[in-house]
Amino acid sequence: MAGMVEVVEIAGAERDRLLALDEDHFTDLKAAEISPKRLSKSISAFANTAGGDLYVGIAESEFFGAKVRHWKGFADPEEANGHLQSLEALFPLGAEYSYEFLRATGSIGLVLHISVQKTHQIARAHDKKVFVRRGAQSLQIKGDAALERLRLDKGIESFEKQSVDVDLSVVSESDVIAEFVRAVIPASTPSKFLKKQSLTRSNKPVVAAVLLFADEPQAALPKRSGVKLARYKTSATIGTRETLSATPVSIEGPLYSLIGQAVEKTAAMVEGIQKLGPTGLEPVQYPHVTLHEIVTNAFLHRDYSIAADVQIRVFDNRVEVESPGLLPGHVTTRNILREQFARNPAVVRLINKFPNPPNKDVGEGLNTAFQAMQRLRLKPPIIEETDNSVLVRIKHDPLASPEETVMDYLQNHQTITNRTARELTGITSENSMKEVFYRLAKSGLIERVPGRLGAAAAWQRTAQK
């Protein structure tokens, strides 16, 4: 078995980058001593989620309290035969799994690199259990309901794997992929990388390859790979031609730069809006991270089988981001903050390999967007499904004041602590929250709870006299 696996030489700089990799949704590092049974759990998890890369032969030790990684691979390919034979029985060599050894200049031993694609079938570990990847963890799927949900997810054929009727050179000879392959581990050629990542079919590039690596994806995928950005000078429910401030902007390019441009141009457009505040006209402020995460999601999780661009509309009191296609799999508008589904797993996984990827915090993007709105005392974004799209509204509506929030809470509870009040209001500073309490106490609305001091201190509504 070991004789079938290629040995790839990598430079010392690549080795150092490998040792410094963060374990996350797409990457796992294991010591060579790991058993094939335990290793199969990680492979099952990657295959059942969005794919990933597993490096076996990376040891970890403590040095003055800090964890330090070092290269400690297999002495030779034959030493890994037990692992390879065991894994190949469960995960046969083919389009969905690939194995190679990495040899680094100046380091002893071979690291086994296992590249896993998301599989169409359920991938089971040695003990027949099923795992999925959540962040840097491989978690077991338990119960018939959860397994049925996974079957539903697996049953969806992603349009990203469909071939595009253009010459393969559109992606294999592009400037984008030439720069990209120089940064991946191990470094590769465009043609070899495309083949290994299953980004070609019948010598044609698939949709994911065109979106990510073509210099001009819009030429091959018209109306499926761009964005329209429009500014409406109104707060009305629907923008009209009369309220359109200028001709909508069309933004094009490969997906990585497209996302960056869309966020940058949207933020610039928003900065030109002013709203009446306590001191007169004030610039409207939306958290940049909120715009970034919601626009990123619109591109990564849209349905590319629908011939429509992503639409971003900037109104006087809100920003709307509309993404073609309904929410995938089991995701609904009610559970979207706690559930995950990669409609386009290859796009999601590979764009994460770009420098400073737009989906750096996989699975946490929307939560981050919501938290950023709360910190600015703005109402959370609203997510809804239309007949054939997902629409996110980011409204510039302030939440109730901290004082109102405290008094509303005390209508149904006898007391409130500083910690509880901070959770309700989004205020992070304990001292800032105290100032809110002091203002309410000065107004005669609340008073300290007698006998409760220090960390147990609490406030209550002022007793009626």
Image (cartoon, rainbow, N blue to C red):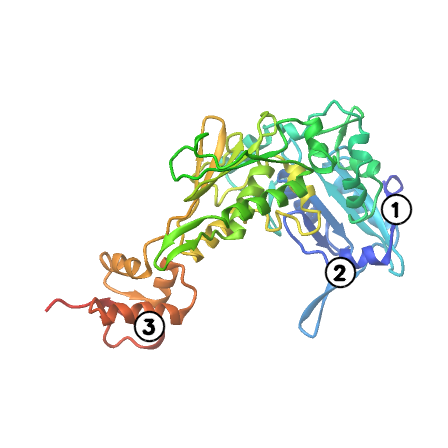
In the figure, 404 relative to 439: above or below? above
**Label at residue 7:** 1
Residue type of the residue flagged with mark 2: Ala
- Reading the image, the residue beneath label 2 is 59
Q: For residue 115, what is the image quadrant? A: top right
Q: Nearer the viewer, residue 25 or 6?
A: 25
Which residue extends farthest left?
465
Q: CA separation, marks 1 and 3?
A: 62 Å
- Reading the image, the residue beneath label 3 is 456
Residue type of the residue flagged with mark 3: Ala
Q: CA separation, marks 2 and 3?
A: 46 Å
**Mark earlier in primary sequence (1, 3):** 1
State yes or no: discs 2 and 3 in contact (Cβ < 8 Å): no
Inspect this view and state whether residue 81 appears.
Answer: no
In the figure, 136 relative to 326: above or below? below
Which one is closest to the eye, mark 1 or mark 3?
3
Lateral position of residue 344 relative to residue 367, left or right: right
Which one is closest to the eye, mark 2 or mark 3?
3
- Pointer 2 local density, CA inside 10 Å: few below 14, some 14–19, many at least 20: some
**Label at residue 241:** none
What's the residue at 81%, 42% (across, down)? Answer: 178
Residue type of the residue flagged with mark 1: Val
Under circle 3, the secondary element is helix
**Mark earlier in primary sequence (2, 3):** 2
User: Which quadrant of the rendered structure holds the N terminus?
Assistant: top right
Inspect this view and state whether residue 442 appears.
Answer: yes
Under circle 2, the secondary element is strand
Which one is closest to the eye, mark 2 or mark 1?
1
Rendered location of residue 108, percent (x, y): 87, 59
Rendered location of residue 97, percent (x, y): 75, 38
